[in-house]
Amino acid sequence: AGIAYSVNNNGQIIGVKSSSAVIYTYDESLQQYQTISLGSGGATANNDNGQIVGWEPYGWGGSRAKLWNPDGSGGYTGTLLGGTMANSINNHGQIVGYANVGLSSPTPRAYLFAGAGGMQDINLGMLSGCTQSWANSINDNGQIVGTSYGAGKLATLFDPTGGGNNIYLKTVLVNPLS
């Protein structure tokens, strides 16, 4: 059993199988998909350059965000006290996810990791009245979406500068598909 989380425009499929981050590859001779293990944890997203992000176990039940590059290099995008998770990577190598911050009661906070020099905790903030946030996806234009948590789950467009100009995606005025 396994879970496929992402497929890039080159057809590379990544996910989790038996508690390991994996790449699903098609074997022509067997006419089926096989898995290549990247190690313990989970692969959550990939880009068209073959970079993969996700997480691996860390400490006592925690996790730390991880980057795998096609040449085998990569590493951790940080551990910020309570642990981290990488949820998305764009074709420029910008990574978003969350970090659990705080010593006594860690809470998830959306973050942007730009790559150079280890984890750069760029606090993306949250909507007013909320206490937690997660960044779920980043596109090649640097737009970041996710969720702010308060009285409920609020769809959020995050300010990538960390300046706090986040937008609540609450109202659809016109259905562009109709």
Image: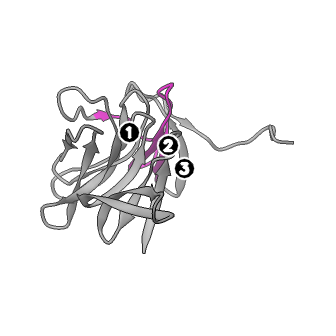
Q: Earlier in the sequence, mark 3 or mark 1?
A: 1
Q: Residue at x 37, y 63 (%)?
A: 16
Q: Is residue 36 visible?
A: yes
Figure check: 133 above or below 89: below
Q: Residue at x 26, y 48 (%)?
A: 65
Q: Which residues are magenta?
A: 122-149
The magenta stretch spans residue 130: yes
Q: Residue at x 27, y 61 (%)?
A: 41
Figure check: 131 above or below 73: below
Q: Nearer the viewer, residue 70 or 60?
A: 70
Figure check: 60 above or below 158: below
Q: Earlier in the sequence, mark 2 or mark 1?
A: 2
Q: Which residue is mark 2?
A: 8
Q: Which residue is mark 1?
A: 50
Give the x, y percent position of residue 5.
Answer: 46, 56
Q: Nearer the viewer, residue 165 or 29?
A: 29
* Three-letter residue code for mark 2: Asn
Give the x, y percent position of residue 146.
Answer: 49, 45
Q: Secondary structure at mark 3?
A: strand
Residue 94 placement: quadrant:
top left
Tell me whether the residue at label 2 lies in contact with that at label 1, contact meaning CB atoms closer than 8 angstroms.
Answer: yes
Q: Which residue is mark 3?
A: 154
